[in-house]
Structure formats: structure tokens, C-alpha cells
Image (cartoon, rainbow, N blue to C red):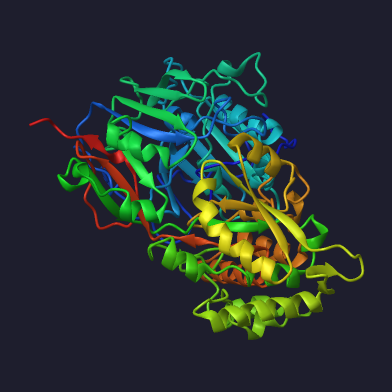
Amino acid sequence: MPLKKTISFLYVWTAVLLLPAAAAAAAEATSQIALYGSPKYTGNWQHFDYADAQARKGGRIVFPAYGTFDNFNPFIFKGIAATQVAALTMDSLAVVPADDISTAYPLLAEKFELTDEYVGFILNPRARFADGSKVTADDVIFSYRSLVEKGSPLYKIYYADVEKAEKLSPSHVRFYFKKGSNNKELPLILSQMLIYSQKDWEGKDFAKPYLKAPLGSGPYILESFQPNKYLVFKRNPNYWAKDLPSRRGFYNFDEIRYDYYQDTTVTLQALFSGNIDVREEYIAKIWVTGYDNDKVRNGEIVKEQIPHNETARLQNFSFNLRRPQFADPRVRQAIDLAFDFEWARRNLFYDQYDRLYSYFSNSGMEARGLPQGREREILEKFRDRLPESVFDTVPSNPVYGDYRSARQNLRRAVALLKEAGYDFVDGKMTHLESGQPLTFEILSNSANGSSFTRVMLPFLKNLEKIGIKAAFRNLETNVFKNRLDNFDFDVAIITFPISQLPGNEQKEFWGSASADTPGSFNLIGIKNPVVDELLEGLVAAQNKEDYQAHIRALDRVLLNNHYMIMQWYSPYHRVAYHNKFAHPQTDLRVGFQPYTWWVKEKK
């Protein structure tokens, strides 16, 4: 499934040809692209169910943003992109709603063609950029070429199964698939492409960072900004798609402002002082204890837990397999055994978090119990290349219940280290052949590092008990990003944004092809042929049962290799906001959807 957020992604030449009309028979145009099953919205539908078409327009809202920025293009390797510029100023070919995640609905494209050979997009004749110029097939092809030739690393893999792009008319473009690709998700992926104006980029290099917002066709225009300080977006009164069903009830504020901060905790006082309007809380202790004041008690500020159905963000301690001390999975498992999540949950998290237990936690597609049915059938093909634990051991995290379980976990860790060729030498866990003590550094970034310090102290102490010396360092956001982009770390606190429909992007996370590419999402450096084959099977799955079985098989293999130490997640978005805003009331578990909010009418 296409990612809504990017970190850093790769460029490669992919042929894009402007050819005469294709010889293949034309497909019947449709109003949706459905990956699995039937679309939720059919016929004369008016708006998505989690948006209020009668929402009041006007007013402004101020959000916090974190870190820094030096450009407005989130799709390139260089620099740090400003938050939300692309999301608010640019439109995609289609929209995938939060309550029907396997279907794309019209936006820039009003109709779709879908065959086994290609996907076609027929543009809406009303589609316009902010300067009034029409959105054309040339713009679509330019955007595609820019991403695959000069964009960040993800796009080499993301669009690898596209053979060519073809302009049939000024408003009609097709993307042809490579023979034998069997990439069922590719039409949905292509539909999520944000479209740039080819004319706007004349004389400019797409790969270079610019502090000039690109011309877009989206609901807002970037009116003003100050690098690393703020961004101000003004709603475009001439927005071409404001009355489309996929846009009704969205983007209700006349002005959206993002103010930049270096630490999430600082924004709590910014909320109370009125400098920001809305704040999503990421720290359990603050959510439980930090809002005990008159503004919350008298209802001036509202606290709300909004349930979501999203696959949990994969927050973890990632091992860098390029480091020789982490080459053996037994070493990685031993370090995992030293992490006492239960202590952190009781003493730091106020029982607000659950432990992540899968690469796809909260998705319904996790590897549970022992492999059965189609999942086992898939795994049996690789039995001679997999540890027996894949078949006979239920995946689970180590549990710290009391001092006895703590001792058992640490004893198990020492036993694994000894199996891997380590032992105590002068109190240090030392590799007996090389004579090197087991030491490493754990990196975090300044936006969340202060909150992690409390979590790290008992973890480091447990590691010390088994002879391992580990240090924790908190880096500025841009330094942290640069270290990750260049794989210059031992262990890092990383969050992978996992789609509700994991697909092609999983190759970028865990596939061998991206492991040696600076700036890729394969920060761990996984090069596992079985993982690669499971990823291919996942992308090629043609029905829901086979797709979910491949997800579970992939999850089980990744878990058994101990590539990361799982952290925690919440099934809620915790949001605090000034009581001048309203949002749709719905039973749909779509989470925090701020662009469906509006300013209440003053009484």
C-alpha cells in the first residue's frame, strides 16, 4: 500500500515512452480501483462516511511540527522536507479513504481503466493547478519520471513493475506492467502518486532541495513560511475539487499553520498558553498527569482518545546488521531478553501502552500460534532454509513478571551468547575468537529522546549485568537522519510506518535490493533470500486468503530472525485541543482525521 509519509527514498532510470495508442484492447472505464472485494462507495455517493459534508468553513487552526526543514519536496534523498507541504498543496490521481483502504476513488482522475496489462487514468477536465492551468497527461508522466529518475530510494522498488507510461491524449495516460509482474497492488500504488506541474519545474533539478513550494493542484497554497519556524497555508477559494465527493467535508479551515518545536514536551505549554490549538500526545505519563489544570477541568481544553484501526506503527530498537557484532541472531535475541517492557509499562507508561508483538500489530494479519493452513504450506517450501523455531515455537516477546522471570531471561541471554561464541572475560561479555567485548551505542533523535531516557536506564543496567556495555545518545533530528541515511549506527530507535495493506513498500523495508542503498528504508540491512521470496509472493498474491497468508509467513520469518526489539503502541490517538473545534462523530475507527475538523460557530 502506498505510504502516506516518507523518510528517505532511491532513484533509477525507468523507461517512460511517449508512444502512439496502445495495441491492446481498451478497457471499460470505471469509477473505482478495488484491490480486494467490492468498493464501499458506489452509485451516487456524496461523501466519505467519516467526513461531514455540512462542516462549517472558515477560521484557522495551529498545529505543532517537530525538528527542522530545508526544502518542500518529501520525495528526494537530500534534505529534510517541511511537514504537510505536499499533502496540502498537491493532489493525487485518486483517494484511498480511511474506511475503505483497499479501494481508490476519483480525484485528479475521474475514471480508471484496469486490465492485466495496464492501468489507465482519464483526468477530470476540471482539474487545475493553483495558477489555473490544466492538469495534463504530460504532468502525470513528468511526475512519474521525476520520482523514478531523481526521487528517493523507495521509488526504484515502488514502481519496478512498470514497463512504460504512455500518453494517449492530453487527458489520458496508461501505465503498462512488465510481463509476469503479477503485482496486484500496482494500480492502487500508481493512483496515489502526487502530480507536479511539468511547466513549473522547467529549469530546476527535481533532486535538489528548494525552499520554493512547487505549483500544486491541492486545497491549500503555501502563503508564507520561515525555515525551521513556521508554515502558513491558505485555503484556495478556487480549489477545483472542493465539490467532489472525495473532498466534501475536508479542508474546512481558511488557514492552517504549523509552528516548529524541537521537543514534543514543550508543546504542552504551547497548548495551554494558546500558541497552538491541537496537540497529539505521545507520552503516557503526560497524558495521565500533565493535563491536571483548570483549563482541562473547566472544559476549555478537551482531552479525547480517538480509536483507530491502523496497523500499529513499528516503533523499535533496530539492529544494524552491517555491524559484525549483530551478525548472529542469537546475539540479537540475547539483547532483546534484557529489555524489561513490563517495568516500563507499570512505572513509566501508566498502563497506557501494549507491547508490539508483530511487524503488523493491530492489523488482524499477525503471525499467531503455530503456522497453519496456507501459511504453513508457504513456509514448508523454505523449511531447509529456516530455523525449526519457525514451525514449532509460538512467536512471543520475553516477559518480566517478577525477579524470578528477570533472572531467567538474563540467564537465557547468557546461554545464547555463549552459543554464539561469547563468554565473560574480566566481567565483560567477550567474543572468544576475536577478543572483542560486546559493546554498542543506541541512537535516538532529540524530538523524542528525552522521553526515552527513563526507559533506557533499566535496559542499560540489565545489559551491564550480562557483561554488555551499551551507551545511549540523543542526536539533533538532522544529524540523526544523516546517520541513518548512511547506515552509521549500531542500534537506533526507529519507527516504520506500516500500511494497513502492506504491499510493495515492504520490499524497501526488508528486501535485499535496498539493503546497500544509502537513504533506503532497509536501515537494518536485511539480506535474507527467504524474506525476498516471501515479499515477491506477497506482492503477487491474487486473492485475499493468499495475501494474508504471505503476510503472516513474512511476519513469522522476520520475528524468528530477531532483527529488532519491539517497543509499544496504543490503539488510540490521544488528542488534546481547545474547545472551539468540532469534528464528525462516527463509530468508524478511523483515528485522528484533523482535516475533517472545523471551527465551531461562536455563540
Residue 410 drawn at (x, y percent): 65, 77
Q: Picture quarter containing residue 138?
A: top right
Horizontal arrangement in the rendering, residue 334 relative to residue 450 (left or right)? right
Horizontal arrangement in the rendering, residue 516 relative to residue 292 (left or right)? right
Number of numbered labels in the structure image: 0
Residue that protrudes farthest toward the right in the picture = 433
Residue 466 drawn at (x, y percent): 71, 72
| Depicted 60 relative to depicted 346: above or below | above
Could one spot residue 245 in this view of the protein? Answer: no
Q: Picture quarter containing residue 533?
A: bottom right
Residue at the image position 68 percent from the left and 61 percent from the top: 536
Along the line of sight, the residue nearer the viewer: 230 or 389: 230
Horizontal arrangement in the rendering, residue 121 relative to residue 465 (left or right)? left
Along the line of sight, the residue nearer the viewer: 257 or 417: 417
| Depicted 368 relative to depicted 438: above or below | below
Residue at the image position 64 percent from the left and 39 percent from the top: 481
Q: Picture quarter containing residue 347?
A: bottom left
| Depicted 547 relative to depicted 454: above or below | below
Residue at the image position 70 percent from the left and 64 percent from the top: 531
Residue 128 drawn at (x, y percent): 42, 22
Residue at the image position 32 percent from the left and 56 percent from the top: 288
Residue that protrudes farthest toward the bottom in the picture = 392
| Depicted 266 relative to depicted 313: above or below | above
Residue 252 drawn at (x, y percent): 27, 32
Could one spot residue 198 in this view of the protein? Answer: yes
Quarter of the C terminus within the rendering: top left
Residue that protrudes farthest toward the front in the picture = 426
Residue that protrudes farthest toward the left in the picture = 603
